Amino acid sequence: MKRVAAIDCGTNSIRLLIADGGPVGLSDVRREMRVVRLGEGVDQTGRLAPAAIERTRLALVDYAECIRSLEATEVRMVATSASRDAANADEFRAVVRQVLEVEPEVITGLAEAELSFTGAVASLSGVAEPLLLADIGGGSTELVLGSATSPAASAPAQPAATAPSARAQPGPKVVAAHSMDVGCVRLTERHLHDDPPTEAQVQGALADLRVALQAAAADVPVSRAAAFVGVAGTVTTIAALALDLPAYDADAIHGSVIDYQQVAEVTGRLLGMRRAERAALPVMHPGRVDVIGGGALVLRTVMEFAGAREVIASEHDILDGIALSLLAR
């Protein structure tokens, strides 16, 4: 049995999964998440802030100790939107090499989309295909159209018109993908400055989103989707709120189906709350309090654009995709 460690470092959070490979896929040993806000201010400055790098380094020190103590034999760390955009990303990579003794992979948005799709669909069954997946992160949002059961593509995700031929082996297949530079942190920093945000600020965020979605539509034929799946903390938090859970419960959230009206109601409620009210919600992680309104806007607007009547929430995403890629080596 092979034990692997996957690390996903995004704009808002850094997460660790240590898992064993088995005949039915992944078996979790440890999952952890820290909100370090690595991408704080990147949209304005183009650089990773020293304080943000230090917050991330401290989390990595703890993760490295966890990996050693649980004896994972292979480690892969993937860094996404903030690290792609920052002019001083080399400083961050040097910190990672020093602490983890592995080279961090700063992947493209399309590679991020493929990993997210693979990780999400591996744990879902009975979902109509083709399915559209939205991975709403801090700095970017990936839209992916694909199948959970078709042969796996042999190369990173590309738009449908240029996707390579598939190998004849079972597994997820990405048909088309697009990465948009809009996420909960980026949208909040650009537009949602007041507490709560003004209607003008919300409209500015929506205009930004609609431009990004029009560009995405050139690559991803969203109208072909038979089902819509959402992953990452924005989606799971909104699902928890829609379900009126007394505390965050990953088992209750995973695979839950939330309709558009529920998403719209939760989004309106979050955008009308002050920070203290959002922080008091029993399912709210402290690191999402400031940015959950922006994330909810992304989810609601993507559903409107795709004509999705409901979203299936998945607790599994790019982190699981990274771990699966290690098991496949």
Image (cartoon, rainbow, N blue to C red):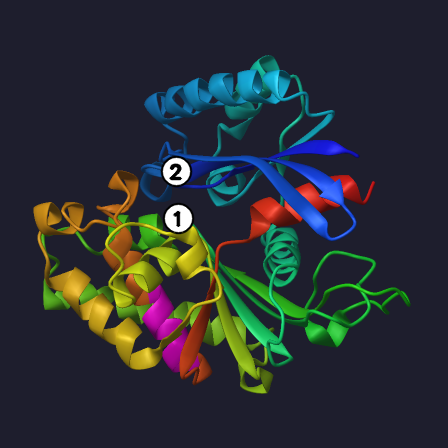
Task: Determine which residue is flagged by label 1.
Answer: 138
Residue 210 visible in the picture: no
Residue at figure coordinates x 43%, y 85% from the top left: 307
| Dot placed on the residue nearer the N-terminal end, 2 or 1 | 2
Say which residue label 2 marks: 39
Helix, strand or loop at label 1? It is loop
Q: Nearer the viewer, residue 272 or 70?
A: 70
Left or right of 243: which side holds 31?
right
Q: Quadrant of the N terminus?
A: top right
Task: Say few, some or many: other residues with alpha carbon within 10 Å of mark 2 (under 14 / 14 to 19 / 20 or more).
Answer: many
Percent from the top left, x then y, of residue 99? 56, 15
Q: In the rendered image, which quarter contains the C terminus? A: top right
Q: Is residue 62 inside the magenta stretch?
A: no
Q: Are marks 2 and 1 in contact (CB under 8 Å)?
A: yes
Residue 248 versus residue 121 in the image, above or below: above
Judged by its main secondary structure, the magenta piece is: helix
**The quadrant where residue 167 appears:** bottom right
Q: Secondary structure at mark 2?
A: loop
Q: CA distance from mark 2 to mark 1?
A: 8 Å
Q: Residue at x 48, y 19 (%)?
A: 62
| Residue 114 position (above or below residue 37) | below
* Residue span colored magenta: 298-305
Q: Nearer the viewer, residue 85 or 317?
A: 317
Q: Is residue 135 visible?
A: yes
Tell me the amino acid under the disc marked 1: Gly
Residue 165, image x, y percentages: 86, 69
Q: Is residue 304 one of those drawn in magenta? A: yes
